[in-house]
Image (cartoon, coloured by chain):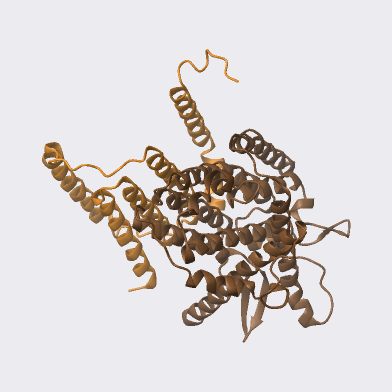
Chain colours: A orange, B brown
């Protein structure tokens, strides 16, 4: 077993463990921290696959910015432990079969397509320069359109968050 | 280089760098007490050793032997984890910082850096953004309203200033065309007109440097941006409930972050280890490291100088300064650099 594979499996184990812990924990802040562990482990996996830039962005954006806001909200609302319910009927009747079906489907797809062309590590563009070439040259229009979309989303959030009467009154 | 030698060299380098960094952290505290003391017409530490030079050791022992209190209503797992997170993230970023060119030892060419990543700068930004958790979780888990307010302030402040910090560095990145800190420094070799060094600060990044400096001071929660621990309002902010070694860990994290910021300022804007080289071969080999350390020391002195000079911001001033002044200025600097490079 190569060193690479061992690391890959270790990060994968952290990832799955974190995801299970996210569901098992009762306190929201523990769940949020498990999600951070999942994000960080995913960054490790990206790094092992040769996608250094994606790994760094994963840490900066997801683990470092979005999850900070999650933790921030949990801290501000001072959310306590969740109360246990008797268990949702829908989760059992629909969730478990749905999960089984999707896992079988994914395994089938992976098995069907494995071995045809295994991609070597570093063969796909992962270097920052390659990504910049793709983003700002080959796919410039979709990239810019996406940024406009995000801008609209930000403006929508601002409109929703501002109080309806704050514009009418003059505040100094 | 075989795998065995590589691992051996990496372990030795990591241990050595960590040792130097922790010693530097201890002596930055000494320097701060000494310099601020003299600015306020006091002596600072003088009793332990000559010039109080053994004061850091005495402080370390004192922290170790103090009672480690855990208040009754804290959320224990995070109360314990928060200082560890703070110190871990603060020490991680030193891994990609180069101190000088490579030196030959036993036939191997060993670069003076733990590892040279082609995403080095992004790694530092990522680790810095993770550093928020130590402070925020410390504030929350202490179950104390002053701590919580400190933690909230810290996370809001660090998230806000991270944007200006990141944008101020993009100008340097455009000019050097790489995320690798070694490549960024290498791009700053040579001179303009035969005497002005080709450092980025003299190469159009003058404004970028000051944006970086201000944003970095806010990121490290130092005066004049030390609102998370403003003692006049919040007792001690997020570390109110901490004592003994756990308190010392927050202190270590703060000073390690200061050193990282000083190293980055040196590497990105002041040419890293570039400086006049002269003398016999041995001296010429050591001089780059000397220049690097000298520049870093200048920045650490500046940090302390600012602390001894400026009063603290008000919270709304802090936020409007970050969002309404620093961020637009950083964007303008980015656009101007991009136009200049494309010209």
Residue at 48% x, 66% y is B245
| Image-quadrant location for residue B186 | bottom right
> In the image, residue A109 lies at what x, y percent?
24, 50
Judging depth in this view, the residue of A163 and A89 nearest the camera is: A163
Q: Is residue B235 above or below residue B49?
A: above
Rendered residue at 55%/63% (across/down): B252
Q: Position of residue B31 (x, y in %)?
A: 69, 65
Residue with the most extreme top position: A168
In this picture, residue B46 sits left or right of residue B124 = right
Looking at the image, the residue that sits furthest to the bottom is B106
Choose top left, top right, bottom left or bottom right for residue B84.
bottom left
For the C terminus of chain B, the image quarter is top right
Q: Is residue B86 left or right of residue A39?
A: right
Nearest to the observer: residue B327 or residue A101: B327
Q: Is residue B256 visible?
A: yes
Q: Residue at x 46, y 58 (%)?
A: B242
Q: Residue at x 55, y 43 (%)?
A: B233
Q: How many marks?
A: 0
The spot of residue B333 in percent (x, y) is 70, 40
Percent position of residue B151, x then y: 48, 47
Is residue B171 something one can see in this rendering?
Answer: no
Q: Is residue B256 above or below residue B162?
A: below
- Residue B178 in the image: above or below residue B94: above
Q: Is residue B51 left or right of residue B194?
A: left
Q: In the rendered view, would you say B31 is above or below B321?
A: below
Task: Judge by depth and name the residue closer to the eye, B198 or B92.
Answer: B92
């Amino acid at each position: 077993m190569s060193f690479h594979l061992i690391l890959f499996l270790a990060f994968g184990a952290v990832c799955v463990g974190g995801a299970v812990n996210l569901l098992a924990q009762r306190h929201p802040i523990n769940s949020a921290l498990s999600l951070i562990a999942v994000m960080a482990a995913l960054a490790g996996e990206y790094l092992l696959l040769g996608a250094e830039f994606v790994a760094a962005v994963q840490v900066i954006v997801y683990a470092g910015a979005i999850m900070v806001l999650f933790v921030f909200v949990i801290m501000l609302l001072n959310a306590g432990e969740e109360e246990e319910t008797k268990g949702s009927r829908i989760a059992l009747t629909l969730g478990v079969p749905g999960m089984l079906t999707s896992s079988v489907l994914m395994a089938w797809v992976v098995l069907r397509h494995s071995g045809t062309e295994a991609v070597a590590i570093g063969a796909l563009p992962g270097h920052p320069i390659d990504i910049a070439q793709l983003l700002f040259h080959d796919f410039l229009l979709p990239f810019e359109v996406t940024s406009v979309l995000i801008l609209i989303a930000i403006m929508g959030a601002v409109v929703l968050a501002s109080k309806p009467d704050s514009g009418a009154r003059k505040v100094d | 280089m075989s795998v065995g030698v590589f691992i051996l060299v990496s372990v030795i380098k990591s241990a050595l760098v960590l040792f130097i960094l922790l010693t530097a952290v201890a002596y930055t505290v000494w320097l701060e007490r000494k310099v601020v003391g003299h600015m306020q017409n006091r002596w600072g530490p003088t009793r332990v050793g000559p010039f109080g030079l053994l004061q850091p050791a005495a402080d370390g022992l004192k922290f170790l032997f103090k009672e480690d209190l855990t208040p009754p209503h804290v959320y224990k797992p995070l109360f314990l984890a928060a200082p560890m997170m703070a110190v871990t993230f603060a020490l991680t970023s030193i891994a990609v910082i180069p101190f000088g060119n490579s030196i030959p030892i036993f036939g191997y060419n060993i670069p003076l850096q733990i590892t040279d990543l082609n995403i080095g700068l992004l790694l530092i930004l990522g680790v810095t953004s993770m550093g928020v958790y130590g402070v925020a979780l410390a504030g929350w888990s202490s179950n104390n309203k002053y701590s919580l307010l400190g933690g909230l302030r810290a996370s809001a402040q660090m998230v806000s200033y991270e944007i200006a910090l990141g944008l101020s560095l993009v100008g340097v990145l455009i000019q050097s065309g790489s995320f690798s800190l070694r490549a960024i420094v290498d791009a700053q070799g040579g001179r303009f007109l035969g005497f002005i060094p080709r450092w980025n600060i003299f190469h159009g990044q003058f404004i970028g440097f000051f944006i970086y400096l201000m944003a970095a001071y806010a990121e490290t929660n130092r005066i004049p941006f030390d609102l998370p621990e403003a003692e006049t309002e919040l007792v001690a902010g997020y570390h109110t409930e901490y004592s003994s070694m756990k308190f010392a860990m927050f202190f270590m994290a703060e000073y390690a972050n200061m050193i990282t910021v000083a190293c980055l300022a040196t590497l990105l804007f002041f040419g890293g280890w570039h400086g006049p080289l002269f003398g016999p071969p041995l001296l010429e080999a050591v001089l780059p490291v000397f220049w690097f350390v000298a520049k870093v020391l200048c920045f650490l002195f500046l940090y302390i100088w600012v602390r001894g000079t400026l009063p603290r911001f008000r919270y709304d001033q802090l936020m409007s300064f970050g969002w309404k002044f620093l961020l637009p200025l950083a964007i303008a600097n980015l656009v101007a650099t991009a136009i200049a490079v494309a010209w």
